[in-house]
Image: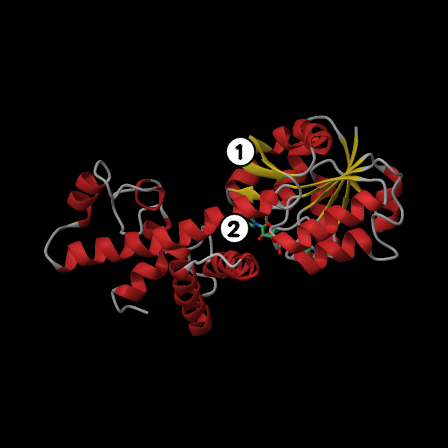
Amino acid sequence: MKIGFVGLGNMGAGMCANLVGAGHEVWAFDLNPEAIKTAQAAGAKGAGSLAELAGTVDVVVTMLPAGKHVLSVYFDPDGIAANAQPGTLFIDCSTISVDEARDAAQRAQNGGFLMVDAPVSGGTAAANAGTLTFMVGGPDDAFSASQPILQIMGANVIHAGGAGNGQVAKIANNMLLGISMIGTCEAFNLAERLGLDAQTFFDIASTASGQCWSMTKYCPAPGPVPTAPSNNDYQAGFAVAMMLKDLRLAQQAAGIADAATPLGAHAEAIYAQLDEDGYAGLDFSGIMRRLKGEI
Ligand code: NAD
């Protein structure tokens, strides 16, 4: 199968390489020529433009920074939709707003294309290893068509429902992650201040009712989980700026849906302050350092 891949950044480079590794003919495009060269070195063919890529392939995968880039790449006059054959499958793996994803799906359908939103859980390590989780929104036929391609790049591919529902799952999950990370940091900091060391508290809480992913897989207190960024000076990992992006998308969607999310709003404010203070690149578990008064 001929696959086009647009957006060869931190995430896209590894995802593109995995499609090549599975034996597909992959045409790669990015605004950054260096990124195309890296994809070529991994075995992809370099496309000179979006139009050339769109006219060549059966499937397009995009992994772009934000919604405005996604809408532009697909629907500008020199973009994908204007140059692709009807019936081409569009798979957008970027994290964008629910509204933009639904708008893109409608415009794709109007043009005779199949489209899914398929945002991911997992960072660059999972992108490189092909172990991402994909949360997929779109009609059954588009989901079925996208499944074999997503399975090459991921360990889990879950159909979340109609167009935009992949993005709904993504922002609801990451809002919970942001809230639970702050709560985990507060609990470890409180325990330590009161004389309970991190390892002992971890041994108790990780088998008690406070247990959560932020604690057992990504413990923000150094020590208990050796692979966590807390043991590497809180280098990301999953950066404050990325968490803030997702919390903002969640708040925007909550406003439109009139859904009460007081803790989601508070989490957004806490990460926004850290971002504003110059810690956009710190791992999101670095809230621990703020609570300790170190930053
Ligand atoms: P990135 O900035 O590293 O890569 C984006 C790439 O898109 C860049 O190479 C850029 O040159 C290219 N690009 C931008 N506009 C373009 C255009 N008009 N045409 C062609 N190429 C264009 O970003 P990333 O970290 O790879 O993240 C991509 C998406 O994945 C984002 O939506 C992000 O929220 C999501 N995501 C990232 C992570 C992570 O850990 N990095 C985890 C989960 C989800």
Q: Position of residue 32 (x, y in %)?
A: 73, 56
Disc 1 or disc 2, which is closer to the eye?
A: 2
> In this rendering, would 46 be left or right of 65?
right
**Amino acid type of the residue that numbered disc 1 sits on in the rendered structure:** Thr
Q: Residues within 10 Å of mark 2 (few under 14, many from 20)?
A: many
The mark found on residue 131 in the picture is 1
Position of 183 relative to 120 (above/below): below
Is the residue indicated by label 1 positioned so its CB lies within 8 Å of ligand 1?
A: no
Q: Quadrant of residue 292?
A: bottom left
Helix, strand or loop at disc 2?
helix
Q: Position of residue 202 (x, y in %)?
A: 21, 43
Quadrant in which the N terminus is drawn: top right
- What amino acid is at disc 2? Ile
Answer with left or right where residue 58 lies relative to residue 144: right
- Report which residue position mark 2 lands on: 171
Viewer-proximal residue among 282 and 40: 282
**Residue 40, quarter of picture:** top right
User: On screen, 35 above or below 290?
Assistant: above
